[in-house]
Amino acid sequence: MRKIYLLASFVIALQCVFAQAPQKFAYQGVARNAAGNPIVNQLISIRASVIDGSPTGTIQYSETHNVNTNAMGLFTVEIGGGSILNGSFPSITLGRWNKIYESGV
């Protein structure tokens, strides 16, 4: 039993050693018009930014995506996989993220 416990501890330790920050992550949203109605089945452009601390903080990373919405206005993008406007995704200071702010382009 002790050997199994030691082996499990070793495997967990190896996973921690080889863990890496993600190079992309999925983000979903619903596109809406000024009246609050979903923008359905249309090509939209969005800009996603990782901002330090607050909406008025320093932009660490920013990118754009062109994506189609579905019948409910839902869209999905991979942050880190768009057209880069500012910064470098691998250089984002992860511990200082506040939110990801999106806006129409």
Image (cartoon, grey):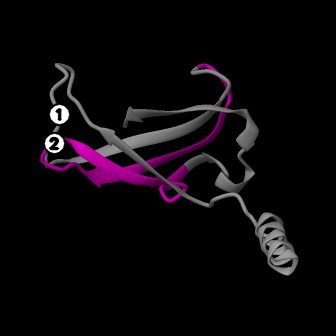
Q: How far across and how far down the image is residue 83, in percent?
A: 49, 55
Answer with left or right where residue 53 lies relative to residue 17.
left
- Label whose residue precedes the other's in the sequence (1 or 2): 1
Q: Can you identify the residue that label 2 sits on?
A: 72
Answer with left or right where residue 78 lies relative to residue 39.
right
Could you say which quadrant of the image residue 95 lies in? top right
Answer with left or right where residue 31 lies relative to residue 22.
left
Could you say which quadrant of the image residue 103 lies in? top left
Q: Residue at x 44, y 40 (%)?
A: 47
Q: How far across and how far down the image is residue 20, in percent?
A: 73, 63
Label 1 crowd bin: few (<14), some (14–19), many (20+), radius 10 Å: some
Amino acid found under the numbered disc labelled 1: Pro
Q: Can you identify the residue that label 1 sits on?
A: 38
Could you say which quadrant of the image residue 58 lies in? top right
Tell me the tag on residue 103.
Answer: none
Q: How far across and how far down the image is residue 87, in percent?
A: 66, 47
Q: Residue at x 12, y 47 (%)?
A: 71
Work out whether 42 lies above or below 56: below
The majority secondary structure of the magenta stretch comes to strand
The magenta span reads 56-84
The quadrant the N terminus occupies is bottom right
Circles 1 and 2: CB distance less than 8 Å? yes
Label 2 crowd bin: few (<14), some (14–19), many (20+), radius 10 Å: some
For the residue labelled by badge 1, is the local secondary structure a helix, a strand or a loop? loop
| Foreground pick, 24 / 57 | 24
Q: Residue furthest front?
A: 1
Check if residue 48 falls in the magenta segment. no
Work out whether 75 lies above or below 56: below
Answer with left or right where residue 91 lies relative to residue 55.
right
Q: Residue at x 18, y 50 (%)?
A: 70
Amino acid found under the numbered disc labelled 2: Met
Tell me how far mark 1 sits from mark 2, CA to CA. Answer: 6 Å
